[in-house]
Image (cartoon, rainbow, N blue to C red):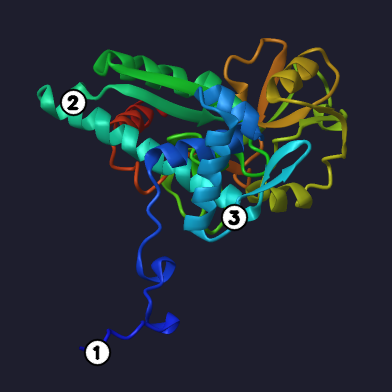
Amino acid sequence: MTAPATPRSSDRPRATAALPADLAPHELRILVAVDRERGFSAAAQALGLTQSAVSHSIRGTERKVGAVLFERGRKGATPTPAGAAAAAHARRVLRLLDTLVAEARGAAQGGGDGAVEGTLRIAAFRSAALYLLPAALDRLAAGHPGLRPEVRVVRELGAGTAGEVAEGRADIGIATLGGSSPVPAGLVGDVLLEEPYSLVHPAGHPDPRSLPLVDWHENCGSYTRDWWGRQDWIPLATVLTEDDGAVLSMVSRGHGMAIMPALSLTGAPDSVRITDLGTERPTRSVGYVTTPELASSLAVRALIRELRTVRG
């Protein structure tokens, strides 16, 4: 009887090419923890695991993914570009698993939007968190008592609130939108309101346009920059503050004038005057962004409904 031929190496199956690199939820949680804590020891402590267990899991994840996810060093673990991308996807996958459980339990208890429970993570820029979101949250609490909103105020600089959503740190973001593609790539969303910019100045000043400009870092995005550049009466800012509240305070004390959007002027003191900038005035689009996978979730849909109700 002839012995079976030994298979050549080229005939052997290649597991990495033939099989998907399935990652278990616990591997995703460890990946997210190392990214958040920037270290294996700190991640292990946060998860109640040993450092060796965390290291072993990350090595296994890297083998499955086929890329180095963290640079190991004396200062901890720094995510590589592949690691940062993987961690963002991991956060979004884990959040979708949480949504699966919450909505399945709600359906088992009788279904309907009112049955939705759990946490809803919201990122909002300052004036939206102060003047737009509270009324929507009041209505949300009345209609969905089992839903627990968590709100983080995020500066609209760089990636802003949309970046928090894209990175999987928020389920929905209240964002400033603008340009030819108002919703960032990879996300979905819509405009909730268009708010005009106005000239704000101390009450009773005879020539407010002669005053120095008070501004803040988040003001005047790309959607107002063209208008701003055409106004030769607007000087460079002599006072630059951290937020619009500080701008309004400075103007109310007579230290200058400012050009501000409507939300930022909610509850403006009597010591300031708000002057319309005319038909060519700039506006700011305020809307929401979320991920395609969470756009149809009950919690996100419920908040969007309430935002549309209270938008003005």
Relative side of 275 to 181, left or right: right
Residue 67, percent from left and from top: 57, 59
How packed mark 1 is, by other alpha carbons closer than 10 Å (few <14, some 14-19, many 20 or more), is few
Three-letter residue code for mark 1: Thr
- Could you give the CA–CA distance between mark 1 and mark 2, rounded to whole angstroms? 64 Å
Residue nearest the viewer, comparing 275 with 129: 129
How packed mark 2 is, by other alpha carbons closer than 10 Å (few <14, some 14-19, many 20 or more), is many
Three-letter residue code for mark 3: Ala
Identify whether 252 is placed above or below 164. above
Q: Which residue is mark 2?
A: 106
Q: Quadrant of the C terminus?
A: top left
Three-letter residue code for mark 2: Gly
Q: Which residue is mark 3?
A: 82
Q: Secondary structure at mark 3?
A: helix
Q: Which residue is mark 1?
A: 2
Residue contact at pointers 1 and 2, CB within 8 angstroms? no
Q: Can residue 112 be seen in this snapshot?
A: no
Residue 287, percent from left and from top: 47, 39
Q: Quadrant of the N terminus?
A: bottom left
